[in-house]
Structures are given as structure tokens and as C-alpha cells.
Image (tube, grey):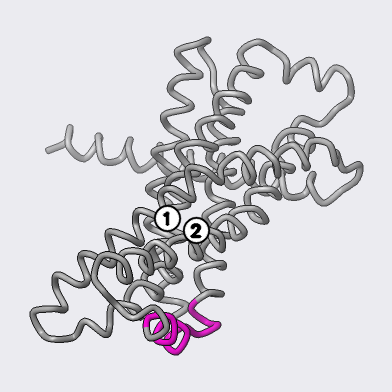
């Protein structure tokens, strides 16, 4: 019994210590990011890497998700003669949930891992120490541009994902299930409201912040050579994915 309580206590203390370190890291990064100078080249580079280079994977994911969603909805709704609801289900599911969540998870695997690996490599090879020696604040130069890019770019990616996902559902519904194109589009726009899109974009901004924060934090605090960088990369992806799912629930409860 004493051993079990001691284990629970150690886990709780480790969790609180990690939460405290992450909070201090976040506060310091935000403070440094709001103060000049601003490294525009770094910011634009992150916009390019997070945004433009992620378009193929996000677009393919959204397209086939919309197609599968239309097929599965038809299979279920046909049992109740409610096939006309497929258009509304596809557009609401993509804009409210599937678009931001799937884009966040895909970006977490691609960008979160890349951030942790890049910054972690800089840490173990003492490049971050070299930045400090050159009077360059590493959190202003490395962390702040990534946080800003994650918050700004991911909603744009989700907007693209929503459009492509709805288009995928349209392709399947019209050319596979035999829906009338004009009727399908009318039902799509009739049921879609501005709040459905904005709620997904708010989620996307939060997810982008989480991905960037986890990737930078684990990379910045990595140690132990190549093994440490590998652990930091894994921790960044796993922690970001879990936090995205947790944040999705609370944001959904708050927004709806």
C-alpha cells in the first residue's frame, strides 16, 4: 500500500513539475515574442513550411475523408429513407469536427515532429548555446515565429481542408450515389452557417498553438544526443495529439 501511494505521489509531482516548466516556457516565449526585434525571415519560413508544404497531405486527407463520410452516411441513412440529409451531415461534420481535428493530427505528425527534431538537434549540438553567445535570444528567434505561424496558418489549412472535404462528398454523392448536383449544393449551403465555419477555425488556431508549443518545448529541452532527439520527437507528436483531442472536447462544449 505504501509503495502504491509513493508511486502515485511521484507521478503527481512529476506531472506538476512538467506542467510548471511548460507554463514558464510558454510565458517566457510569449513575452519574448511580443518584444522587438522581429525575425521576419524566420516567420515567413515557418509560414512556408507549416502552410504551403502541408497542403498536399491535408488536402488528400480531407478529400478522402469527405468521400468516405458520404458513403457511410448513405449506408446508414438509406435504412431510414433519409438520404437527403447526407449533404448536411458532410458539410457540418467537416467544418465543425473532422476538418480541424484531422488537419491538426496530420500537422502534428508532420510539423510537430519536424520542430522537435530541428530544435532538439540544435540543442544537443550546442547551436542554441551559440545563439546565446551571439546575443540572440533563442526563444525569440526559434520559438516565437513557430508559435505565430502555427496559430495563423492552421486555420487557413483547415479552411482549405473543409472545402476539399465537402467537394469529396459532392463527388461521391453525385457520381457514385446518383444525387442531383444542384439539389446537393442547395442542401449544403442551406444547412451551412457562418458559426459552423468559424467554430472550426477557432479550433484550428488552438490546435496550431498546441502543435507548435509541444514541438518547440520538447525540442528545446531535449538532451542525451541522438536518442534524446528521438525521444523529444516522439513526445512532441504524442503530447500534441492527445492535447488536440482533449482541447477539442472542451472547445466543442464551449462553442456549442
Q: Front-most of 118 and 124?
A: 118
For the residues labelled 2 and 1, the Cα–Cα distance comes to 5 Å
Q: Quadrant of the C terminus?
A: bottom left
At label 1, counting other C-alpha atoms closer than 10 Å, the crowd grade (few under 14, some 14-19, many 20 or more) is many
Q: Is residue 153 above or below residue 167?
A: above
Q: Which mark is residue 239?
A: none
Q: Secondary structure at mark 1?
A: helix
Left or right of residue 129, residue 117 in this image: left
- Residue 6 position, x and y percent, is 25, 35
Return the residue at label 2: 161
Horizontal relation, residue 72 to residue 166: left or right: left
Residue 52 position by quadrant? top right
Query: Which quadrant is the N terminus positioned in?
Result: top left
The secondary structure that dominates the magenta segment is helix
The residue depicted at 56 percent of the width and 68 percent of the height is: 202
Q: Position of residue 86 (x, y in %)?
A: 28, 77
In the image, 119: left or right of 113?
right
Q: Are marks 2 and 1 in contact (CB under 8 Å)?
A: yes
Residue 226 at x, y percent in the picture: 50, 11
Q: Earlier in the sequence, mark 2 or mark 1?
A: 1
- Where does the magenta region start and end? 184-196
What residue lies at 32% left-to-right and 60% top-to-bottom? 67
Q: Position of residue 220 (x, y in %)?
A: 61, 28
Pointer 1 residue: 62
Residue 73 quadrant: bottom left
Amino acid at each position: 500500500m505504501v509503495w502504491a501511494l509513493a508511486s502515485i505521489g511521484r507521478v503527481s509531482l512529476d506531472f506538476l513539475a512538467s506542467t510548471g516548466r511548460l507554463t514558464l516556457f510558454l510565458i517566457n516565449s510569449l513575452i519574448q515574442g511580443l518584444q522587438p526585434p522581429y525575425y521576419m525571415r524566420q516567420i515567413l519560413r515557418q509560414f512556408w513550411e507549416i502552410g504551403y508544404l502541408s497542403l498536399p497531405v491535408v488536402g488528400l486527407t480531407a478529400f478522402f475523408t469527405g468521400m468516405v463520410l458520404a458513403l457511410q452516411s448513405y449506408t446508414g441513412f438509406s435504412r431510414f429513407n433519409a438520404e437527403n440529409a447526407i449533404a448536411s451531415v458532410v458539410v457540418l461534420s467537416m467544418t465543425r469536427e473532422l476538418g480541424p481535428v484531422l488537419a491538426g493530427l496530420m500537422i502534428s505528425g508532420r510539423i510537430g515532429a519536424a520542430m522537435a527534431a530541428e530544435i532538439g538537434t540544435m540543442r544537443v549540438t550546442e547551436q542554441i548555446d551559440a545563439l546565446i553567445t551571439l546575443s540572440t535570444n533563442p526563444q525569440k528567434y526559434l520559438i516565437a515565429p513557430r508559435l505565430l505561424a502555427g496559430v495563423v496558418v492552421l486555420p487557413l489549412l483547415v479552411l482549405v481542408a473543409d472545402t476539399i472535404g465537402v467537394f469529396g462528398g459532392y463527388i461521391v454523392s453525385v457520381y457514385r450515389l446518383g444525387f442531383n448536383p444542384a439539389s446537393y449544393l442547395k442542401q449544403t449551403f442551406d444547412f451551412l452557417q457562418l458559426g459552423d465555419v468559424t467554430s472550426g477555425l477557432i479550433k484550428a488556431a488552438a490546435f496550431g498553438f498546441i502543435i507548435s508549443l509541444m514541438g518547440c518545448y520538447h525540442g528545446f529541452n531535449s538532451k542525451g544526443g541522438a536518442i534524446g532527439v528521438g525521444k523529444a520527437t516522439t513526445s512532441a507528436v504524442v503530447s500534441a495529439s492527445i492535447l488536440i483531442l482533449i482541447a477539442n472536447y472542451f472547445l466543442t462544449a464551449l462553442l456549442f
